[in-house]
Image (spheres, rainbow, N blue to C red):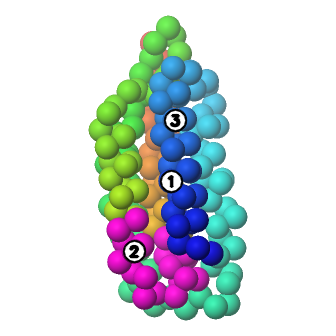
């Protein structure tokens, strides 16, 4: 696929994520936290990339991609918080989240353009590994923060 087309898709998805995040500040999450875990479910089709027989990654490339993803997850985990308003739980507004998220996108674009010598199939898998390595820990930590907020709500009653 065309590089500009893929960049457009990535920027479109990022815009949707940012808009949803801004909207979630005004919409209560509910008691079950289903929406927090949805992005992990959305990663599942990407697992098909790993089954591609044309992909040949070295262990050090895979490990580096995982480490980069984990490093990306730290600021997202730190800046994601919840608050109680009107007896409900909302995503807490944090401008730092927006800066970190946009920074991650910029880094991904830079890394993608820097690593153009890698075969497209390998690049797609590496970027999927990076994305998975920051989305999964971030969402799991967000879920735990949410559950902690629910438990503190129950203990207050």
Task: Determine whether, in the image, residue 151 is placed left or right of residue 97.
Answer: right
Region rendered in magenta: 109-127
Task: Tell me: residue 48, above or below residue 142.
Answer: below
Q: Earlier in the sequence, mark 1 or mark 2?
A: 1
> Secondary structure of the magenta portion, mostly?
helix
Residue designated by label 2: 113
Residue 78 in sight: no
Q: Look at 50% across and 49% down and name the residue there.
A: 14
Q: Residues within 10 Å of mark 2 (few under 14, many from 20)?
A: few
SS category of the residue bearing label 1? helix
Report which quarter residue 80 is drawn in: top left
Q: Quadrant of residue 99?
A: top left
- Magenta residue check for 118: yes
Please give the residue where the numbered disc 1 appears in the rendered image: 11
Q: Looking at the image, which is closer to me, 120 or 26?
A: 120
Q: 58 above or below 92?
A: below
The residue singled out by tag 3 in the image is: 19
Image location of residue 44, percent across then percent down: 67, 62
């Amino acid at each position: 696929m065309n590089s500009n087309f893929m960049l457009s898709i990535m920027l479109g998805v990022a815009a949707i994520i940012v808009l949803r995040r801004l909207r979630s500040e005004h919409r209560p999450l509910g008691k079950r936290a289903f929406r927090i875990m949805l992005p992990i479910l959305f990663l599942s089709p990407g697992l098909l990339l790993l089954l591609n027989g044309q992909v040949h990654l070295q262990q050090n490339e895979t490990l580096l991609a995982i480490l980069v993803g984990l490093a990306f997850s730290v600021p997202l985990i730190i800046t994601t918080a919840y608050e109680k308003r009107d007896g409900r739980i909302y995503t807490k507004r944090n401008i730092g989240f927006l800066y970190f998220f946009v920074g991650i996108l910029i880094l991904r674009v830079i890394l993608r353009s820097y690593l153009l010598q890698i075969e497209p199939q390998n690049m797609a898998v590496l970027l999927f590994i990076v994305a998975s390595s920051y989305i999964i820990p971030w969402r799991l930590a967000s879920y735990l923060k949410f559950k902690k907020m629910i438990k503190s709500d129950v203990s207050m009653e």
